[in-house]
Image (spheres, grey):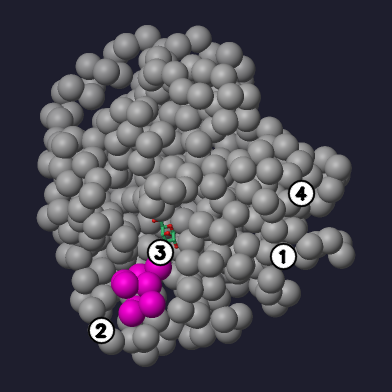
Amino acid sequence: MRTRPLSALRKAIARPAAPAASLKPRTRTGAALAGVLVIGMAGSLAMHQAPLPAAASGGTCSPTITTTPFGTTIEPYTGKPAQVFQYTLTNCTGMQVKILNYGGIVQSIAVPDRHGHAADVVLGFQTLNEYVSQDSPPPPAPGGPYFGETIGRYGNRIAKGTFTLDGNTYTLPINNNGNSLHGGFVGFGNHVWAPTVVQGNGTVGVQLKLVSPDGDDGANVGCSCTGYPGTLTMFVTYTLDSSSQLRIHYTATVAGKATVLNPTNHSYFNLAGESSGDVYAQKVMINADSYTPTDKTQIPTGVIAPVKGTPFDFTTPQTIGSRINESDPQLLIGQGYDHNWVLNRAGLQTGQLGLAARAWDPASGRELTVWTTEPGVQFYSGNFLTGSIVGISGHTYRQSAGYTFETQHYPDSPNHPNFPSTVLRPGQQFDSTTIFRFSTF
Ligand code: GLA
């Protein structure tokens, strides 16, 4: 396990911040949030306050951000080399997050345990070359793990890589068992995004911008398919505050034609540390009474099924490993958990943050709370990590080395009129927020 004493992180905090290129206060703060009733780790009911407004904490210490060159790579849109940077966000409680403008990737998140020892709690690679060649390489390479990536245009699967919108049929690259997964051959995760450092209101962060052209992931990636319609201008902004909240804010507009959009972040968490082995003893709660079962190719059948009485019931905290090997047909299809949970959002407006999930590592005392404006979350237990990948600290990642909470609209929504819509039209503003908050118990 990679651990660092808190003192090392405190030293990092003393480093001067990079100059702020612009000040961008974020739109949604905790001020708009109501207290939410959740079930605590011990199974007792507790009033859990939603994410704190950043300005409400931090005292005299302010989070810092530093910028480090991380190498160059060929940008697929232009075919020319582009500079990649690593942004290191450090707060005053010993949390440090590294973001890359390549793929909008979260490379590492170091957080203290209950004794103040920090460990990196997400799976990642050490070098840009590994991200380029292994994270989500185009065919003929085998499908990658998408560690930490910003996924788009469409998070998770679109059946047979086709959908119709406004009477037009669109076709996408087939890259997963006859379906289109996570945007196609290139997606958002293999582009170099335009970065801007943002600071203010007790937070530091980086805003990343990508303009995805009309027909993206079609002919421009060598696919004899239409690609996604409309020119999409996409922003993802990562900010860290002193309440140990990593906030991910997505905005987008489309020009020319309507499109479908379902971005998410594909970080794999392991609260015991990214090199600590399997996560089966960690506990998870998902705030969902139902989920969307799939066919054998992992496309939702369209049914919204209750979780009660199944291994998919995480309404009270359960260890990941306690039921993962049951013979439930859905667990066999996913080779573990790899499904979309339908989040309980009763009483919440569209665009309001709601509790999605929580996770605990009993050994280290680290806890993660996930808030989102999205209606679903893909809880994926790292089933397809086969031991072929060596991670950021030199440890080989094997099955269930980490788990994702991919906040999202439901998979294959463009082909399911009964699912919340993922259509974005010219003149509309896409706006979505997810918060990963770390604490100890
Ligand atoms: C998603 C999918 C999984 C898998 C991973 C990446 O979570 O649902 O089936 O493809 O991405 O490996």
> Residue at coordinates 40% horizontally, 47% vertically from top-left?
141
Q: What type is the residue that disc 1 sits on?
A: Phe
From the image, tell me which residue sits under label 4: 229
Q: The residue tagged with tag 4: helix, strand or loop?
A: loop
Relative image position of residue 376 (x, y in whole percent): 54, 65
Asked if disc 1 and disc 3 are in contact, CB closer than 8 Å, the reply is no
Q: Nearer the viewer, mark 2 or mark 1?
A: 1
Query: In this rendering, does residue 143 appear at all?
Result: yes
Q: How far is disc 1 from disc 3 in space, using C-alphas?
A: 25 Å
Q: Nearer the viewer, mark 4 or mark 3?
A: 4
Q: The residue tagged with tag 1: helix, strand or loop?
A: strand
Relative image position of residue 317 (x, y in whole percent): 30, 71
Dividing the image into four equal quarters, which quarter contains ligand 1? Answer: bottom left
> Residue at coordinates 54% horizontally, 42% vertically from top-left?
186
Relative image position of residue 349 (x, y in whole percent): 67, 62
In the depicted view, which residue is nearer to us: 23 or 418?
418
Asked if disc 4 and disc 3 are in contact, CB closer than 8 Å, the reply is no
Q: Is residue 380 left or right of residue 295?
A: left
Q: Nearer the viewer, mark 2 or mark 4?
A: 4
Q: The residue tagged with tag 2: helix, strand or loop?
A: loop
Q: Which residues are magenta?
A: 331-338
- The disc at residue 163 is 1
- The disc at residue 379 is 3
